[in-house]
Image (cartoon, rainbow, N blue to C red):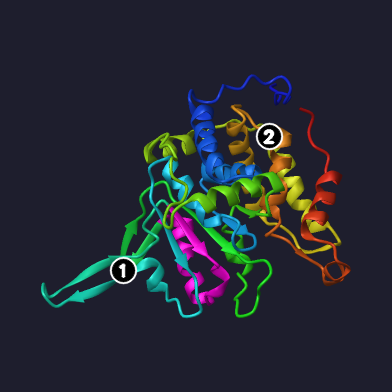
Amino acid sequence: MTTEPDIETIQPEPPPSGLAALIGAMRDEIRQVILGQDEVIEQVLAAFLAGGHVLLEGKPGLGKTHLVSTMARTFGGHAARIQFTPDLMPSDVTGFRMFDMKSQTFQLRRGPVFTNLLLADEINRAPAKTQSALLEVMQERQVTIDGETLRLPPPFMTLATQNPVEHEGTYPLPEAQLDRFIMKVLIDYPDQVAECEIVTRAAAEAPGESGGGVRVVCGPEEIVAAQQATAAVQVVPEVVAYAVALAQATRDARSIALGAGTRGAISMVRIGKALAALDGRGFVIPDDVKRAALPVLRHRVQLTPEVAISGQGVDEVLAGIVETVPAPRS
């Protein structure tokens, strides 16, 4: 008769050589340009390692676009930006075929989704039909144009932004599409020291200059290998059960009208693996899942009207739920 090993006694394999160093180098390069947002950088890198997509929410002017372009430069990848507007069409996102009079043939015009890092700016300003054009891209990493399926170059990640203050003329993302994002990352104002440094640097830059001097630390192939190595990080059944218990607790909570589904539990484990890799470990501990809980779950739950009216926020409610779910011994 065999028994499952205790979390304390397992001897996991160390992370693949160079993975922690590679991600650490990327993080250091991004930090040189994006100041005062260390937690945001860590969460976005974790989502990138996990092969997921991120919903970025913050007021304008906090460096969301700058973060995407800087991150792409660290691995020599390509970044593209789509400004979502009410008149944006699905073909403006994915691409289309146009008849060329000279050659008398239809020519493919690839849309901005054919990139490594896609910034979908103010995604909630476009109608549902255009928003849904991203669904196949995000889930399948492919685009279908006139019946032809085209694969996107790996790695691929969508980072969609929302303005948390201005809601006039917006189209809220439906729950099914919100669930496609592995995390919702909140960007707040930096502290005074970081903000002074940002202002000093920006004021000294000539027009058109931004974030120069970022070093390329690897190529796209190394990122794909890092994502595969992250997926191979070990997680014991007790930690998986902890993630499932957290997701189930959101469904049972009286303060939550709509709880997280199974994809929420899967995402907590995937982000937990990425956080372990960021810390240089080849195994997931309960604290990794706990750190992942709020950014993974905050866009997957809906508060009851009574709680929402009372002024309680989603993060406050989720933090209380996380504290009530016992973590396995580690």
Distance CA(mark 1)–CA(mark 2)? 42 Å
Whether residue 215 is situated above or below residue 318 in the rendered picture:
above
Q: Is residue 178 left or right of residue 308?
A: left
Res 270 seen here: yes
The magenta-colored residue range is 117-141
Q: Which residue is mark 2?
A: 237
Give the label on residue 55, or none: none
Residue positioned most to the left: 103
Q: Position of residue 145 (x, y in %)?
A: 32, 68
- Circle 1 residue: 147
Q: Residue at x 71, y 19 (%)?
A: 9
| Amino acid of disc 1 | Gly
Q: Residue at x 61, y 60 (%)?
A: 179
Q: In what quadrant of the picture does the C terminus appear?
A: top right
Left or right: 101 in relation to 192: left
Q: Is residue 114 magenta?
A: no
